[in-house]
Amino acid sequence: MLGSSVMLYYYLRVILRTEVEEELHSTESRLEKSIEEGGEVYQLPPIVEVKKVTDLNKEILKDTLIYDPSQDELEEFRELSTFSMINGENYRITVRALVVESENILLAVVLSYLVIILVVFVFLFYLNKSRNQKVWHPFFRNLDQMKSFSLTSEKPIVLMESDILEFSEMNNEITTLTNKVRTDYKNLKQYTEDVSHEMQTPLAIIQAKIENVINGEMLDNDQFVQLTSIQKDIQRLSQITKRLTLLTKIENNQFLNRERLDISSKMSETIHDFSEISTINIDFEIRENVWVTMDPYLAQVLCSNLISNAIKYSSGRKNILVTTQQGQLTIANPGESSIQRPEMLFSRFYRESDGAKSTGLGLAIVKRICDLYGFSIAYYFERGMHYFTISFS
């Protein structure tokens, strides 16, 4: 549109100049005819000037500026000077036409064209905007439905119908996909629960039989060590199964119960339980109670895994320090050196050492619980102490 405006400007300029030049030639022809017929020589400076000359020259067509005393300014004229022999005498006939009005007409036309373009643009903009809002309304409604879609909910997804073929096909595909995903999720969930449940029974039976063998027969030292090792492996396998099941339930958002509880109180109960089975001292300081909204069972798991991890990897030279203040929970346990790969600390099955006493899932569960509720967890090593800080705010 802007390009066409420039083209229109120059096109009209050429047309107007051509019309002015045609008018000048017409006036010049009428003057020649009047002189030839013996009429009075017409003079109207600066519009028309007729002079007798001695020599004939070529026709001159040019622009010139002439002072206008009435306006007290210079005006632009288009000037045509022709030389002709009329009745045996040489004449120079000069005719001029004011081109200022032509330029004003040109600008008026171009400005009108630009105004029309602007009006059309504004009209089409708001027309298309209102039309697009109507056309895309089903799409954004269905997008909101997709955002609120949950695998754990039995509520079917309700999509808004549309007259647009592409949106209609998309609705069909979304309905098919969500139904299939929900079905696959239910099957996977059932499979996980079945496997976890079925594995616990044979593991418990094997554990009981090993205990009977250890307690009921005379065993040499090597046999006792091997059976004890097998017993520990069975216990570890049982813990891995339970923790993997817990991780799956957390990631599938199956813990929908939320209560307002004091995490300081939960931590105090956890420390009391561990103090009965561990020889490592734990110093707990409640500088400020920390209230959170979460599932009570996951709160207990969070506290237990943090304390269990601190006990397992404590060097024993210093006490474990636990504090709650300003919406934060901090657990610090003594250690020889910093974690070599802190970026892997909350990954599944990552262990800094090869000790069989750890499943490598405790901190992974802590991280998933924090992600579920929007908590942030950080680790750093300072002055021989490993610090884990959870911010609940």
Image: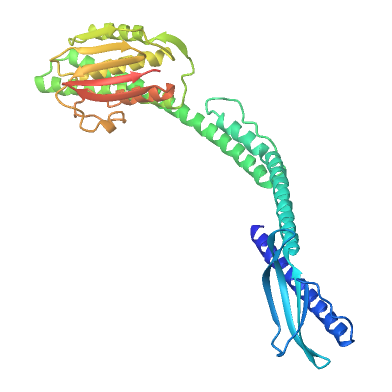
Work out which residue is located at the far bottom of the displayed protein and give it: 88
Question: Looking at the picture, how far across and down is residue 68, in whole percent?
Answer: 72, 63
Q: Which residue is rendered at x = 81% and y = 93% of the image? A: 88
How is this picture coloured? Answer: rainbow
Relative to 207, is 120 on the left or the right?
Answer: right
Q: Is residue 209 visible?
A: no
Q: Quadrant of the N terminus?
A: bottom right
Residue 262 quadrant: top left
333, 175: nearer the viewer: 333
- Does 89 appear above or below 178? below
Residue 393 quadrant: top left
Question: Looking at the picture, how far across and down is residue 374, in whole percent?
Answer: 42, 23
Question: Looking at the picture, how far across and down is residue 108, in whole percent?
Answer: 74, 57
Relative to 40, is 15 on the left or the right?
Answer: left
Relative to 246, is 66 on the left or the right?
Answer: right
- Does 113 appear above or below 314? below
- Does 70 appear above or below 85? above
357, 109: nearer the viewer: 109
Number of marks: 0
Question: Looking at the picture, how far across and down is residue 368, in whole percent?
Answer: 38, 25
132, 263: nearer the viewer: 132
170, 66: nearer the viewer: 66
Q: Which residue is rendered at x = 47% and y = 14% of the image? A: 258
Q: Which residue is rendered at x = 17% and y = 9% of the image? A: 279
Q: Is residue 347 visible?
A: yes
